[in-house]
Image (cartoon, rainbow, N blue to C red):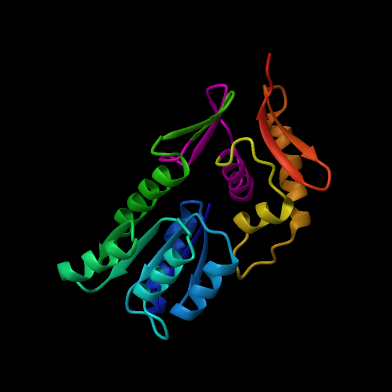
Amino acid sequence: MRILLVEDHPQLAESVAQALKGAGWTVDVLHDGVAADLALCSEEYALAILDIGLPRLDGFAVLARLRDRGQTLPVLMLTARGEVKDRVHGLNLGADDYLAKPFEVTELEARVKALLRRSVLGGEQLQRCGELVYDLGARRFSLNGEALSLTAREQAVLEAMIARPGRVMSKEQLAAQVFGLDEDASPDAIEIYIHRLRKKLEGSAVRIVTFRGLGYLLEAVEA
């Protein structure tokens, strides 16, 4: 799951990004509202974390443009403004949650998990594909009741696929979820992760099917 973090304070942005990356998410970091607006138009994210006091275009304006385009991804607003009127304004524009500075990174992580659980899993804690189960709160996959050992990249691919049941995902779409803006997002690398995941799913009733020219589908095999 790919997150956009927009914060104009470099040190805060770096510490938050490192914490989120350490929890297994792919994180893009931007420092102004215009860059954020462009990224939200062209990239696919599971969630956006927006500071209000951004240069060039403030967080309220970025949020308003996002919602005007009909984009429904959850947005968590960060602000040093504690006034109720500012929180109300952000919520009326379509913000899903609000966190005032200073904050504990652990609280931010908990709020991110809650927002993703509601938006990606429809409020459920667990996502299932046959014998494969994903626990969003723990950020953990299990297969036949046993923990599935995955690298960060493998986990990102599998998260993207299990979150879109019945949907064929192209290499480009998967790469967009696995790699950040500052990384070499080679779609061909996805083939390597798919190969490794297939090896780890061997012997189970869950498989990854290739649709030539289209992409990959995660499915449970009927008995």
Q: Is residue 200 magenta?
A: no
Above or below 182: residue 148: above
Note whether residue 51 is visible: yes
Note whether residue 103 is visible: no
Q: Which of 172 and 70 is in front in this view?
A: 70
Q: Nearer the viewer, residue 180 or 61?
A: 61
Above or below 215: residue 144: above
Q: Quadrant of residue 163?
A: top right
168 left or right of 165 in image: right
40 left or right of 195 in image: left
- At which x and y percent is residue 87? 22, 66
Residue at x-position 42% and y-position 59%: 19
Residue at x-position 67% and y-position 54%: 173
Q: How many labels does the image show?
A: 0
Magenta region: 135-162
Q: Does the magenta stretch include residue 141?
A: yes
Q: Which of 103 and 99 is in front in this view?
A: 99
Residue at x-position 60% and y-position 55%: 177
- At which x and y percent is residue 146? 54, 25
